Structure formats: structure tokens, C-alpha cells
Image: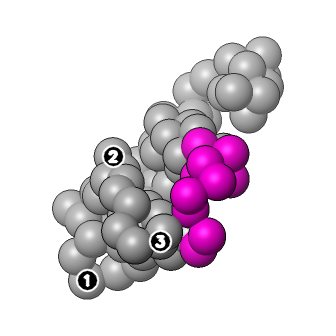
Amino acid sequence: MIKYEIKNEIGILTLNRPEKRNALHPELVRQIKAKVKEAVEDESVKVLIITGEGKAFCAGADLEYLNEMRNYSSLQNEKIQES
């Protein structure tokens, strides 16, 4: 769901769900958090650029996923938010 590369001390993190206009989904958020942490800990990375593949940077929340969440219990939704 994301691409990450380093060029000339610049980390480039690309949201890669163009078919969904890079809408935020729990797995995408987990991947973003992991790569940002990796970039922060990598002393060779001086700058981090976050961009989006396709026509939109990020459309916000994934509405299809939000609709699915309505069927989850409150405990299931809490676990998703914690991860």
C-alpha cells in the first residue's frame, strides 16, 4: 500500500492506493507509521517527503472501510484503533 525509497538523503514515502485515491485504511496507516519510524531512526535520511500516487494525495478516510466498521462490535473497533 506504500512505496518507500531513499535518494540523496531524502526519504520518499508514497501512498500507493490510487484506485482509492490513497484513502486511509488501517493497514495503510500501520505501514505509514512503520516507515516514518524507520526514516526517523535512519541517520542517513535528512528529509522525508510524503506524497500520493495518482490524481490525489489522500482522500481522507476509506469510506468503504468505514461502512464495514459499522458492523463491528465496540471491542473490535477499539482493537483496530489501538493497532
Task: Locate residue 15, reporting x and y percent.
Answer: 38, 61
Q: Which is more N-terminal, label 2 or label 3?
A: 2
Distance from label 3 to label 2 (Cα)? Answer: 20 Å
Nearer the observer: mark 3 or 1; the answer is 3
Image quadrant in which you'd find residue 57: bottom left
Q: Which circle marks residue 1 in the picture? A: 2
Q: From this viewpoint, is residue 5 visible?
A: yes
> Over which residues does the magenta segment extend?
38-47
Task: Locate residue 51, reporting x and y percent.
Answer: 42, 74
Q: Which is more N-terminal, label 1 or label 3?
A: 3
Three-letter amino acid code at disc 3? Ile
Q: Is residue 2 above or below residue 72?
A: below
Q: Residue at x 48, y 69 (%)?
A: 9
Task: Locate residue 59, reporting x and y percent.
Answer: 45, 73
Q: Is residue 78 above or below residue 53?
A: above
Residue density around tag 3, few if under 14, some if 14–19, many if 20 or more, within 10 Å: some
Q: Residue at x 24, y 65 (%)?
A: 18
Q: Nearer the viewer, residue 68 or 13?
A: 13
Distance from label 3 to label 1 (Cα)? Answer: 23 Å
Residue density around tag 1, few if under 14, some if 14–19, many if 20 or more, within 10 Å: few
Q: Residue at x 61, y 48 (%)?
A: 42
